């Protein structure tokens, strides 16, 4: 499960402070899917970054599968992220000089060092209908294929939680549908919890639940937080 409790994030800027999250909370049960929507600037990326352990909140807690990641130091958060999270972004971020199979295999080697990855990688690519593309480099794939390869890479180590930030944001509607199919199929196959940020109502409708994140009440440009 994923839970965020009473999150506040205040950024310091040259002109003062900006409140990106103002007492936001969220609970997603294990194996569940939730889509987060809301206008630009309402704090979606900030929230996802906290769930990913990329930053710590100003106050509040983030707990993933019983571990309170918001209280871990940076080294422990990096380790937790590597083993327990799968990340999908708007851009595929595949390594350009590695094939699809090598990209996915590298992720498995990083998350689960000491395992023999070859069989698992091939089985997953077969399962997702990507096996015929395994030997290709990213620039030999279409945008939709690249994003599905990126999803394979995000799930190969069977993470407890998949975080996706606008995973269909650069795809046309047909490819967006195939990508979200791949994402949800993978999430179910491994029993992961999925948190998805999207602007696309069709994509959001595929989640069990949609959360509309509100704009923080004020961006307190002149106040000094602490
Ligand atoms: P969204 O993803 O919903 O567009 P963000 O989380 O990116 O929203 O941003 C929320 C608010 O925090 C915005 O007002 C944004 O300008 C501000 N913000 C985001 N990141 C920073 C930062 N590193 N420094 C200062 N302000 C930031
Ligand atoms: P089978 O049912 O023949 O074992 P599947 O086609 O269901 O094969 O899956 C092939 C392999 O890939 C299996 O080992 C399965 O556990 C694994 N697998 C399927 N989906 C995923 C996924 N999203 N992430 C990781 N492994 C997966």
Image: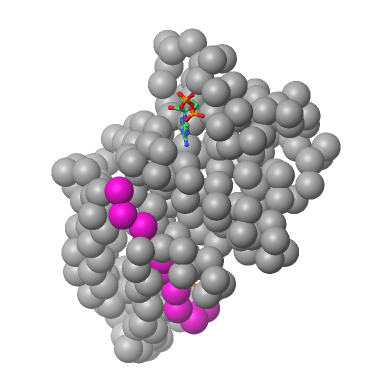
Image coordinates of residue 159 in percent, x first then y, are: 38, 37
Q: Residue at x 48, y 31 (%)?
A: 156
Q: Residue at x 27, y 41 (%)?
A: 73
Q: Residue at x 47, y 50 (%)?
A: 184
Left or right of 15, for residue 144: right
Left or right of 179, for residue 163: left
Above or below, 100 against 35 in this view is above
Image coordinates of residue 52 in percent, x first then y, are: 38, 50
Q: Is residue 24 magenta?
A: no
Q: Nearer the viewer, residue 154 or 51?
A: 154
Image coordinates of residue 152 in percent, x first then y, are: 56, 37
Q: How many marks?
A: 0
For the question of whether residue 127 can be seen, the reply is: yes
Q: Is residue 38 magenta?
A: yes
Residue stretch in magenta: 31-40
Image coordinates of residue 68 in percent, x first then y, are: 19, 47
Give the quarter of the image for residue 94: top right
Give the quarter of the image for residue 56: bottom left
Left or right of 162, for residue 109: right
């Amino acid at each position: 499960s994923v839970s965020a409790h009473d999150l506040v994030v205040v950024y310091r800027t040259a002109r003062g402070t900006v409140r990106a999250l103002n007492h936001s909370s969220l609970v997603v049960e294990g194996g569940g899917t939730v889509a987060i929507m809301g206008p630009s600037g309402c704090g979606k990326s900030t929230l996802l970054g906290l769930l990913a352990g990329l930053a710590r909140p100003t106050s509040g807690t983030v707990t993933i599968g019983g571990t309170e990641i918001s209280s871990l130091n940076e080294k422990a958060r990096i380790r937790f992220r590597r083993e327990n999270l799968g990340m999908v972004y708007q851009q595929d971020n595949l390594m350009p000089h590695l094939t699809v199979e090598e990209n996915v295999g590298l992720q498995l080697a990083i998350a689960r060092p000491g395992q023999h990855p070859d069989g698992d990688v091939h089985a997953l690519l077969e399962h997702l209908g990507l096996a015929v593309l395994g030997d290709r480099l990213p620039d030999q794939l279409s945008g939709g294929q690249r994003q599905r390869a990126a999803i394979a890479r995000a799930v190969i180590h069977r993470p407890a939680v998949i975080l996706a930030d606008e995973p269909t944001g650069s795809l046309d509607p047909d490819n967006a549908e195939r990508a979200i199919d791949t994402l949800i199929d993978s999430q179910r196959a491994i029993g992961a919890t999925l948190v998805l940020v999207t602007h696309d109502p069709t994509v959001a409708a595929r989640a069990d639940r949609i959360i509309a994140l509100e704009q923080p009440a004020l961006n307190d440009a002149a106040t000094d937080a602490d």
